Amino acid sequence: MILIYTHKITPRVRYAFKHVFTRILLIEIDFTSKVEDFVAYNGPKLSYTKVPLGNEFFIKSTNLLFQQGINDLDIIISKWDGVPCFFYQGKKATIPFDIFSASFYLITRYEEYLPHIKDKYERFSATESLAFQHDFLEKPVIDIWAFKLLDKLKEKFPDYDYKERKYQFISTIDVDNAYAHKYKSTVRAVGGFFKDLYKLNVRHAIDRITVRFNIKKDPFNTFEDLIKLKEKYNVRTLFFFLIGDYTTYDTNVSASKEKFKLLIKDMVDYARVGLHPSYYTMHDFEKLKTEKERLEGITNMPIFRSRQHYLRFLLPDTFQKLIDLEIKEDYSMGYASHVGFRASTCTPFYFYDLDFEIQTPLKLFPFALMDTTLNDYMKLTPKQSLGKISDLKNEVKRVNGTFITLFHNESLSGYLRWKGWGRVYESMLKIASK
């Protein structure tokens, strides 16, 4: 155990230190605000305050972890051995910046509480983020800082028994459209058929007919392949099903269709299943509650995982609603437009509510990339995408973090805009599970 001295033990202090020490470095810690207890302790220890007490391992603190509420902070980026950092505190400390305040700022998404320009889907834009503006979005800098801190700790306390965490990989699948044509209402099918003809998409129109009359398999029905790949590569796989009512943005098969219900039940037998709350749930608690109950009615089991459709969430409101509905894990922490680490960490963490200044029981699992980001936003070819996937995986592997990817069942189809992408998912599994 490492003893931490600080002049005031706040919820923010506990939260930031536990993420760096306990979750990333697997080091047990305890806190004291009594100088005499700190001086008397014979084991490894460090102080986190304004001035050192003696010759101990010292990190000079800013005011952030001793404040409450949101303030507009002046962020100036520096470098620590080539790694971007901020809250520079000078060279008298063992580490030249306040690693814990900087980590807290990034992991709580402090900047998303400040005034900012939203994108057309009412989301915080990646380009508004400190990480994007200073070119460290594709690096899990909190984990990198933590391991550089570990090197300093080993120099100071070489006899301490340090544990090493293991790299993990989680594949997540969003099911926005379980089927391209199958099991959709007659009105939607006929409307889609004439729309295809109007746009001269003759092949697509023919596909609609052949699939509906069971002449061809529905192209988006890739679930058997996904399960086979899960077992082949022994990959932890999660499916998030969109079961909201039909809207412009929510176009899945109706949750009342028996074939769709059977599909969900089948997936429960082979993998973990979570809720994909529909587009308008960001502002509608009752809709969110209804969809959770609907999925629980299909699976006959409690649902405690979720990821917002279109990655639409508002801090802290959306996460507060999920907590009220006893959701324990959320997988929305990432950007649609850019790959990388939205919270600057590749370690799952608990949501800290800046409104109430508490660590909540909601665990956030940050993903590093999404198939639609690579294809639709970045316009990468499958080969270029695999190169980007490999780069991000290597960043996570260097710090033995958790590499989480987001694909859709339809991207395995090689159909329409996914032409040429049929084998990308399996290739990604090979890269990620090495």
Image (spheres, helix red, strand yellow):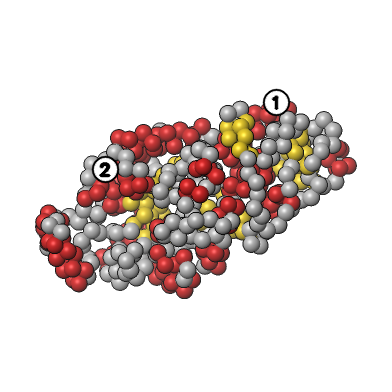
Cα separation between marks 1 and 2:
48 Å
- Left or right: residue 299 versus residue 79 is left
Q: Going 32% across and 48% down the picture, which residue do you hit? A: 376
Q: Is residue 34 visible?
A: yes
The image shows residue 193, relative to residue 45, as above or below, that is below
Q: How far from the left and from the top, in percent, is residue 221?
A: 24, 55
The image shows residue 81, relative to residue 299, as above or below, that is above
> Residue tagged by mark 2?
421
Q: Are the two marked residues, 1 and 2, in contact with CB atoms closer than 8 angstroms?
A: no
- Left or right: residue 283 versus residue 74 is left
Q: How far from the left and from the top, in percent, is residue 300?
A: 41, 67
> Residue tagged by mark 1?
155
Task: Report the disc number at residue 183.
Answer: none
Q: Going 32% across and 40% down the picture, which residue do you hit? A: 380
At label 1, the amino acid type is: Glu
Q: Going 45% across and 60% down the picture, which residue do you hit? A: 122
Circle 2 residues within 10 Å: few <14, some 14–19, many ≥20: many
- Left or right: residue 399 versus residue 54 is left
Task: Label 1: state its secondary structure.
Answer: helix
- Left or right: residue 32 versus residue 267 is right
Task: Label 2: state its secondary structure.
Answer: loop
At label 2, the amino acid type is: Trp
Q: Is residue 300 visible?
A: no
Which numbered disc, 1 or 2, marks the residue closer to the eye? 2
Between 234 and 293, the residue placed more toward the observer is: 293
Q: How far from the left and from the top, in percent, is residue 404?
A: 44, 45
Q: How far from the left and from the top, in percent, is residue 205?
A: 13, 59
Q: Going 41% across and 60% down the picture, which residue do you hit? A: 121
